[in-house]
Image (cartoon, rainbow, N blue to C red):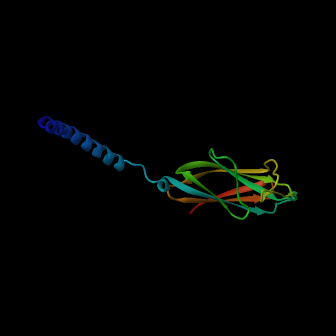
Amino acid sequence: MGRGGRAGRDGGLVRTPVLALLAFVIAGCQAGAPPSASEETGLLEIRATFEPPTGDEPISMGGYAYFATVGELVEEAIPVDGTLRVHLPAGTHPLTVVTRPQSDTVSIVDGEEQREVYDISAECEADVEVTPGGSVQVTYRGIGGSECELIVGEG
């Protein structure tokens, strides 16, 4: 019994420093823990508008589709009647928005409208600064099919 008690004391002595060390490590990790995802990222909101061409440029009968690429992200369509929202890490990101003429033929596949789009006819680029927890609004002005402008603002 004395032996069991002694082992218990030795185990207790061993456990106490281990528990203290564990508590210290956990406290240190919490103090240096990274901020939450909402603090590390910001929101980029991209909307597209169409304006008639400035000269005698022909207009695509099917209209135009607009696509955005941010940094390493794959080209994403900007909704015709809405805004493309992209959550990004805080920092400066290259943004490219392009105009593509589209076919006037519409197909419905699995309940989704599908149109064929053609080669890029206009392209605009800008660097956008995304702040932690903030938002940046970008308006892409498609002017006819061959001109464009990016307007960057903060929200």
- The residue most toward the bottom is 81
The residue depicted at 72 percent of the width and 53 percent of the height is 67
In the image, is residue 6 above or below residue 43?
above
- How many dots with numbers? 0
Quadrant of the rendered image containing residue 72: top right
Q: Where is residue 94 shown, x and y percent of the image?
A: 62, 47
Q: Residue furthest top?
A: 3
Q: Quadrant of the N terminus?
A: top left
| Residue drawn at the location 26% of the way across and 40% of the way down | 18
> Eyeballing the image, is 122 above or below 153?
above
Q: Which one is in front, 61 or 4?
A: 4
The residue at the point 42 percent across, 49 percent down is: 34
For the view shown, which residue lies furthest in the left direction?
2
In this view of the protein, which residue sits in the foreground, 31 or 16?
16
Residue at left offset 29%, top offset 43%:
22
Q: Position of residue 3 (x, y in %)?
A: 14, 34
How far from the left and from the top, in percent, is residue 44? 60, 56
Q: Quadrant of the C terminus?
A: bottom right
**Residue 105 picture quarter:** bottom right
Counting from the top left corner in percent of width and height, residue 30 is at 35, 49
Left of 115 or right of it: where is 26? left
Camera-side residue of 103 and 109? 109
